[in-house]
Every structure is written in C-alpha cells, then in structure tokens.
Image (tube, grey):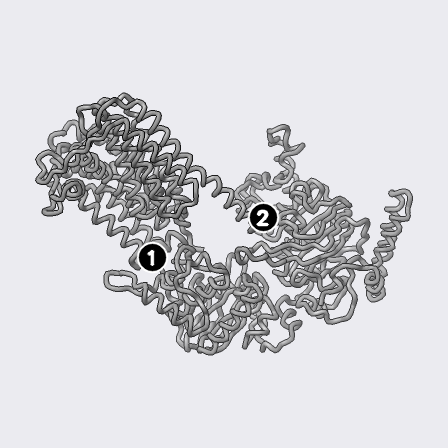
Amino acid sequence: MNLELQGITKRFGSLVANDHIDLSIAPGTIHALLGENGAGKSTLMNILYGLLQPDEGKILVDGQPITVQSPKDALAAGIGMVHQHFMLVPVFTVAENVALGHEETKPLGWLDRRRMRAKVRQLSEQYGLRVDPDALTEDLPVGVQQRVEILKALVRDAQVLILDEPTAVLTPGETEDLFRIMRELRAGGKGVVFISHKLKEVQAIADTVTILRRGQVVGERPPSTSEDELAALMVGRNVQLRVSKTAATPGRVVLDVSDLKVATTQVLVPGEEAALAVNGLTFRVRAGEILGIAGVQGNGQTELCEALMGLLPVTEGGIHLNDRDITGASPRDRLRAGVGYIPEDRQQDGLVSSFAVAENIVLDTYDRAPYASGVALKLGAIRQTATERLAEYDIRAQSIDTPVGTLSGGNQQKVILAREVGRDLTLLLASQPTRGLDVGSIEFVHRRIIEERDRGVAVVLVSSELDEIYALSDRIAIMYEGRFTGFRPPDVPVEELGLLMAGIDGSATPEVPEAPGIREADEAVEAAEDPGAGGAAGVEGAARASEAGGREADGADRAGGATSEGPGTEAK
Amino acid sequence: MTTLAVAGRSSLSIGRRWVAPAAFLLLALIDIFFFAHYAHKGDATLAFSQPFAKVTVPNLALPGRATAYVMGGLSVVLAAARALELGKVARRASIGLVLFFFVIALLCWAYAGSSNTFNVINQFQGTLADSIPLILGALAGCLCERAGVINIAIEGQLLIGAFAGAIFASAFGTLWLGIIAGSAAGGLVSLLLGVFAIAYLVDQVILGVVLNVFVSGLTGYLYDKLLVPYANTLNSPSTYLPIKIPLLGDIPIIGPVFFDSTLFLYITYILVAAVQIGLFKTAWGLRVRAVGEHPQAADTVGISVKLTRYRNVILAGLIAGIGGAFLTIGSVGSFGKDMSSGRGYIALAAVIFGRWTPLGSVGAALLFGFAFELQSILSTINVPIGSYFLLMVPYVATIIAVAGLVGQVRAPAADGQPYVKA
C-alpha cells in the first residue's frame, strides 16, 4: 500500500503546526520523520490517524483520496499507530487488548478467547514479537507493551505503521529489539513511519529521512547523510535575532556544579536501575554571565534544570550556590536564596492557570512581607505590585484579576518573568524561555534576561533554538546524552555546534568548563586580603580576560583547558 | 524509588496482617463474654422447615450457653490460625467461619431458654427478599461504573421506580405494567444522569446527589398532591404473590428459600447472570470495561466512548427501576414518602465491597440483606438490646469481613472522569 500526504496544513490559532506538508510512504520501507519537539511530527501523524482534522490537504492511498475522520477510518484504510503513550488497558490481558474493538466472537457476541489467543500467537511468531497472549498488560515491561501496541495494528491488517517516538521510553537493549522487529515488518511488506529526534537511531534504521522544522518539510535525505547535516536541518540556522548587548563582565562564581548526576523520571522496568538523564556535569557560572546550554531536546536539559531547582533529586554530585551547598535544599529554600526559574513548560510548571494574574505574580512570595502578615494576605499590597508589574512588563491582560490561563503564550511568559525577575536574584535558570512565542515577545524576554545579567545575576539559559543560544550566551555548553560534549565561545561556527550537538567532537579543541581566562580573576580574589577590593579587581580581570577570549578563542581555550578538570574532557 | 515502594507495601501489609486476627479475637471475646456469659439456661431451637411443608426437617435444639462458648473458643482458634500465613482460600473461609460462629452465638444468646424458635428458612427467605432492591441497585452501579460513570443516583432510581410502579399497577390494575413503568422511570432518571455527566461534564458525585434530592422532592410532592387524595385509585396496587417452581420448590430448605418467591427474585437471577456474563464474557463487556478503564484506548480503536456510556447508564436505570418497583408491588404494595430509605447508598457500598463485579456485589448485598432480616426477626422477640444497636452489629461485622476479604480495592481507572477528546 502506497500512502501519500499532499499539502497537509494544520493551524492551532495563530500557530501553524503543519505547513503544506507532502510525504510519501512506500510499502516495505522504513521512513523516518526527523524533527525537534514541536516541529509538527506528532500533529502530522495524528492527522493521518484521524485524531485531528487537517485544515487543508489530502491523504491518498494507492492514488485514491480517502477521508480519515476518526481512528476507525484510519484503521479501515490500513493505517495503524503506536502512540507515544500506550493506548492499552492496564488490567486487560494482552489478547484482550489486541482484540479490543476487533473481537473474535461466537454467536451472541460471546468472546472467542481461544481464537483471540491463537491470533496473537500467530502474529507474534510471524514478526518475532515474543508476546504471551495471557500476560496481564500492566505487568509487562514497557518494551513488551509497545509490542502489544504493534500487534494491535497488525491484527487489524495495517499496511502502514506509525511509530511515534517509540524509542523514547526504551532502554538501549529494548531499542535494538524494536529495530529488529521493524526490519521484520519491513520484510513483511509493511510501510513503517518512524518518528524520532535521535539522529543515530534514524541513521541506523531508516531507508528515507524526512526532516521537519517548524511545521515544514525542510528536506528529504538518505540515511547516509552526515549527522551534522541532519542536525543542522533539524535545528535550522535561520536569520539570527539580534539583541544588542555589551560584553559580559563576569564576577565571582555563583553557581558551582560538580559531577552532577540525575536519574530519569521514568522508571522503565520495576526493579531496574533508572538510567541517568544527567550524567556527570561539572560547570560554574559567574555573576554577570550567561551560560547557554545548547542541545537537541531530550538530552537531559529538562532534568538538569529541575535538579538545579530542587524539583528532582540529585543522584550524585553537588550544587553550590554562593559557596553554600544547596544540593539537598528544597525548592523554597532555593527561591529564598535568590534563584529564579523560568520553566520549560509554562502552563504545567510555571503558572496556576485558573489563578488570576495578580495571584500568579506573588506565587513565590505570597507568604512573606509585604504580601502577608501572619496568616493573612495583604491584598492591597498584592494588587499594587501586580498593577505595577503589569505596566512594567507590558502584560496585555484585561486586568490583574484575569485568570492567567486565558492570556496568550507571550503574556503568560511575561507574567512568569514579572514574578521571577521581579525580585532580587543571584541566579536565573531560564529553560526554553521563548518557546512558542511571537517575535515581539521573544525580543522582550531576551532583553530582560540580558538586563538581569548586567545587574550581576548569573544566568543559565537552556535552549534548543540555536538562534537564541547565539543571541544571548556569553559562553556555550553543548549537551548530548546527559553530558557536555564541549564548551565554546559564542562565536563558534554553527557547523561545529551541530557536530557537538550530535555527540561528535569534530575538532580536537579542549573543553572549557570555565569562562576563558577567568582563573586569573579567581586568583585575584583569593590573593586579596580585603574581599571588597579583591572582588573589584576580579571583575576587572574577568573583563579583560573575556575580551581576550572573544578575540583569540584558541589561546583562551588552551588556558582554560590546562586548568580544567572533570568528566567533560572525556566526552567524545 | 523502587525499594521505597516495596518497603512501603511490606510495612502496610504488616499492618494489615494484624487487622484480621485482632478482629477475629474481638468477635470471639464478644461470643464468650457477652453471648455465652449472659445466655439464659436452656436450649435455643432452630427450625429448618415451614409449617405444612411436604418434607419436614427436624428442629435443632442447641444448649444455648455451651454452644456460645464453643463458638467463642473456635473463633479464638481461628484468630490464632489467622495470625499465621494462610492461603487465599483458607483466609476467606476463616472469615466466613468466624462470622458464622458469631451469628450462631448471637442466636444462642437470644433464643436460649425461650419458647420461640428461630426459623432459618424465614431468615433466608427474608434475606433474599430484602436483598432484591440492593442487588438490582448494585447491578446498576456496576454497569455505570464499569463504563466510567459514577452512579450515586441509584437511590433516586429506586425511589422513582417504586413510585411509578405503584401508580401504574394501581391505576391500570395490571402488575406487569407496574414493572415496566418502574423500570422506565428509573431509565429516565438515568438519562438525566447521562446527559449531564456525559454531554455536560457535570461532576458526577454532585450530580448524583442532586438527582436523589430531586426525585425525593418530586415524588414527595406528587404523593401529597395525587397519591393521598386519590389513594384508592392511584396508590393501592395489588402485589405479586410467590410462585413456587415445580420440583425445585419442594426440595427441603433450598426449595422454599430460592424457588418459592415472587417474579422479582427470578428476574433478579436472570439479570445477575446476564450482567455478570455480559461484562466478562462478551465483546460488549470487553468494550464497556475498556471505556471505564482507558477511554482513550477504546476511542483509538474505534469504540464510541459516549455511546457506550449512554447505553450503560440508561440500562442501569432500567434495572434499578425494577428494583424500585419491587419495593411497592413486590413487597408492601402502596408507596410511601422516601420509602427507598437509603437502600441506593447501601447498593453503592455493595458495588465497592464487591470490587465492581456483579457477583461480588451480589455477595455484599446478601450480607446486608441478612443483617436487615436478622435485625427485624430479633426485634420481634424482645431481645434486651436496643433494635438500633442490633441493626448496627451486623454492619460492623460486615465491615470487618469486607476489610479482610476485599483487600486492595481498585475502581475502574476512568471512573467518574468525563471523556473529552483531545
């Protein structure tokens, strides 16, 4: 069965999730759909599976246009899907889950369990799935549950199988197993759509690779294409947004992270050790500098931020803030210590969407003066602050009583900024701070972040947008599979960055866990008797050093490399 | 994390391990120090046949005090045994036995030295009759909750079924019309539940309570305005008479209990079997359970979640309505205000205690029915305990039984959650 998508367009409000996408899936091939989170891969596949309706475009099966208004239509047309979150009833047996909606029955609707089981066994053997039809689904490891999902599609005689980020939940061993099954499916003449953002996997298994970025197809390549080319296509190198900023003047070390390890939030198999999402990071961030952490989404950035904020437990290693050990401190302690946090998912983690703008603005300080006395809230003070912030941050809301959930994404982000940046900070963690925002809001957010830096706040910026990394960072760390593959100055060529993001250390340049030449400043601080004078000298030294680093990255790199320690140097 | 979870579970089970033996011991102590100690001298007589039965079974005379002591002693032994590791079957059997001993000890105390005899057949007949509305209500609960809709409105469905059953049977003089009308009225209340819960996503617990209050108010008003002034035409239905099933009905003990009753009991048998088999042996049931556990999974394989839920909710109302009709035309005849008196809520408890399975809920409903009947029989023989207290004791025993029997209760995962397509 030849499946073709023509000019598929899907809009959500002003956001174009899919922009005239053409795609053709031939039988007996594995077609990879590569793109970052939010590139529109899942939207496209949900359209194909009938979970969403396209605004424009057609779906053709063997040249004949079909309408897919529900999963039922898709299944009837021979399209099956393995969802990222499995659509399995946990308390059912494998055979029951596979048969659901497509039951084998005797007269009067009586279930024919024997035939249901036999069918599972037969397909399981044919494609090497190794699934026991009588096992209770919730007792199965994730990898096996995924195979049950595949069986569900096969039992309905699906000719095209969509696998939505199938490896995201798998251990490396399970991934190998899945690839073996995918090859068997291909050999059986099925068309397989493999959605992923992992370059290596795509190269290992796909026959064709289509790259999506911001809802558009930006290219179709053979899997032999180099990783850096794929990475560059995926992340893009559009016109850079320019925010004017002066050179950084880094001061004393604010954040000192040593050999940090954080386990993933997903426990894959009960009883099994969780994998490490952050696997030995060592870095320092100084007052008045922005450390940009670049990388393809899903390489441990989220876990890093949450561990820094105290939302995830640290498995190993330490976090020091202004020489104070905060490794085990609660999020509230960290807030009090002057850490600001702009979370990646603003609706989920950043705001209480049913609360008013004013309430969201004081969400972290509501229990202290001037907003509270004893157990009572001082509503007047809260309203006054909220009104001021509304004007200061140009938040377009009807009033401070408007529920924050009704605001646009840009205004929601400004509410978070107003809260986090509105108090005196020593460290700002900004994770994907401009995701999904319009150009105007992006500029606003960028400007505020730079203002904070200039005020002497240490900033950690995590972004998968290279434009943003280039626009803001004073130093760039590149993260790949829980480790830093390198530190680079902000004028590093995009090709080199792409290689590092793909986990390839193309150049032999040594790593720079410190800002170039900062050691001098450190020594100046230590040498000085009077801390005040020393601090001033340090800042001067740092300024000089960072200028030097900017002009002659090579020399500075060598200087930094000579003094650096830690696992960064071992990264490949 | 995993070790934590394991540790948490094992400490919980250590706590649980001592609940059952302690409860057993408590019942044993009541057997010995209350029932046996305060029993009058003389025998307690249990009768196993009804007057004029074709085949009679001789009465059983138990020495009251001695029997109660024996019962208490056996319970102590069981409590000790329970403290050891027992298999699943042995655990369940031990709970049944302890409760059985408790009831025997109670009867010995109540009837020792008395000229009254305790008629076991009457007790069981009454148990089944009392259980009919509970069982049908519980079936309604199972049908709804298995599809993911919480049905608190069982009470209202029973009440309106009783009301409609009485009026229609009385006005038209046809009993079967009463059953149909009661059933239809229950279905209508269910339809309201369905529309608001499924289409308008109203909180189902609140909705159910509101519907109960609504039905109570509506039937109460109509009772005052219609049934009282026109009582002769509208509120004096005849009632169903027992039908004895040939042969089966003549078996000693079993016959009179199970096969000599009104049409309602036979309908209940059929419905219990139909719902149990339907839910667990048919394609329909598989789909219903999928909708209640993981509606999205059902949706993605082409099963309409809303349609399934509507169908089940309405079906549930039709069944509960029959249970309501029993209260009037199967039992006392005329309708009285709020005559369902909490049976709907007890049916709901039976659903949960029965782990959302029809057979389990029937078991729980029978336990409750047994308690009702025992209380009503004991209250007629001047037992020196307040009747409310008597009413309470079996419930306490039931709760203990359930705490030991049911173990981890797990509701359908999507129970009470409205389904909105992504």
Residue A557 is marked as: none
Disc number for residue A349: 2
- Amino acid type at mark 2: Asp
Please identify the quadrant where the C terminus of chain A is shown.
bottom right
Residue type, mark 1 in image: Leu
Residue B157 relative to residue A450: left or right: left
Per the image, the residue denoted by label 1 is B286
How far separated are the C-alphas under marks 2 and 1? 37 Å
For disc 1, the neighbor class at 10 Å (few under 14, some 14 to 19, many from 20) is many
Element under label 1? helix
Question: Is residue A224 shown left or right of residue B289?
Answer: right
Vertical side of B359 occupied by A469: above or below: below
Choose between A446 and A255: the one closer to the eye.
Answer: A255
- Rendering coords of residue A333 (x, y %): 68, 41
Quarter of the image where one finds residue B395: top left
Q: Residue A77's spot in the image, x, y percent?
A: 38, 70
Residue A432 shows in the view? no
Residue B49 visible within the image: yes
Q: Looking at the picture, does residue A263 appear above or below residue B45?
A: below
Up the image or down, B63 lies above or below A143; here it is above
